[in-house]
Image (cartoon, rainbow, N blue to C red):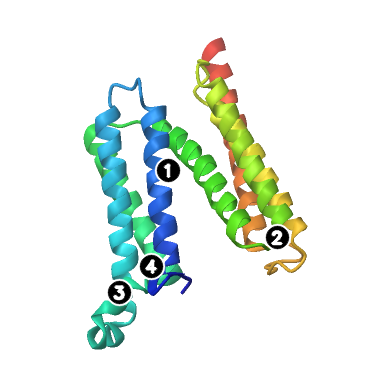
Amino acid sequence: MHTIQIGTVVLNGPLLLYVLFGAVGWLIMKYRLREAAERDLILSCAANAFWLWLIVWKGSYMLAHPVEFIQQPMALLYFDGGTRGMWTASLVSAAYIGYRSWRRSLSIQMWLDLGVWLLFGCWFVYHSLLLAISGEAVLFHAASAALAAGCFILLVASQSRTDSGKYVGYAVWFSVGNALLPFLVSDRPLRWLSFSTQQLVFMLAAVCLTGWSAYAERRKKEGTHG
């Protein structure tokens, strides 16, 4: 558990970070959807999914540590379900968004577009905070924040274009960058050969996004010639 102490008050660090992500995400979505006809519906769905994620993530501590929770219920303020709780909360929130999207006929393409905007924005905030308070791996955090900021600026500058799949290209370069930048940290935990878990995840994401982009482009050309 990572905590932040302000005077005599001890706060749950991850909880504050995720609430900050929620606030940043809310502002990004309001900007991105400012001209969308389904703006209020999408914002409502996203807000409900976010609070559902927080509740499941924190509440999963009760299932993982029932005895400790019964003995000290206030521990729920400081502890959470950890990595397993995060995955559980993510699956529940994704299922909720999928169900609401199916009921309201919301576009998957739209959610993917918003997801890229949120990823770039929150990644910038995350590494900017670590750069300001951690004092470690300064070059890595500065470069990661700069990469996210650059990709976000490209999204803002190109959002008036008619190509709805433009975000895929930015996501590929973002993934490639995040697969390379961890080499700046010499003491990073390694998962396979000289690659960390983050590097492997972003390498896989870059490959999948590149394949998807090529497939979509081919389908588009076939539809044009057909």
- The residue that appears at 41% across and 42% down in the rendered structure is 25
Q: Position of residue 119 (x, y in %)?
A: 51, 43
Mark 1–mark 4 Cα distance, whole angstroms, equals 22 Å
Give the residue at mark 3: 76
Q: Earlier in the sequence, mark 4 or mark 3?
A: 3
Q: Quick check: marks 2 and 1 in contact, CB under 8 Å?
A: no
- Tell me the tag on residue 85: 4
Q: Element at badge 1?
A: helix
Q: CA distance from mark 1 to mark 3?
A: 25 Å
Q: Earlier in the sequence, mark 3 or mark 2?
A: 3
- Secondary structure under badge 3? helix
For label 2, the residue is: 137
The numbered mark, 1 or 3, whose residue comes first in the sequence reads 1
* Structural distance between the alpha carbons of marks 2 and 4: 28 Å
Amino acid type for the residue under numbered disc 4: Gly
Neighbor class of circle 2 (other Cα within 10 Å; few <14, some 14-19, many 20+) is some
Looking at the image, residue 74 lies above or below residue 216: below
Tell me the number on the disc at residue 24: 1
The residues tagged by marks 2 and 1 sit, at their Cα atoms, a distance apart of: 24 Å
Q: Mark yes or no: residue 34 visible.
A: yes
- Are discs 3 and 2 less than 8 Å apart at CB? no
Foreground residue among 20 and 133: 133
Within the image, what quadrant is residue 10 found in?
bottom left
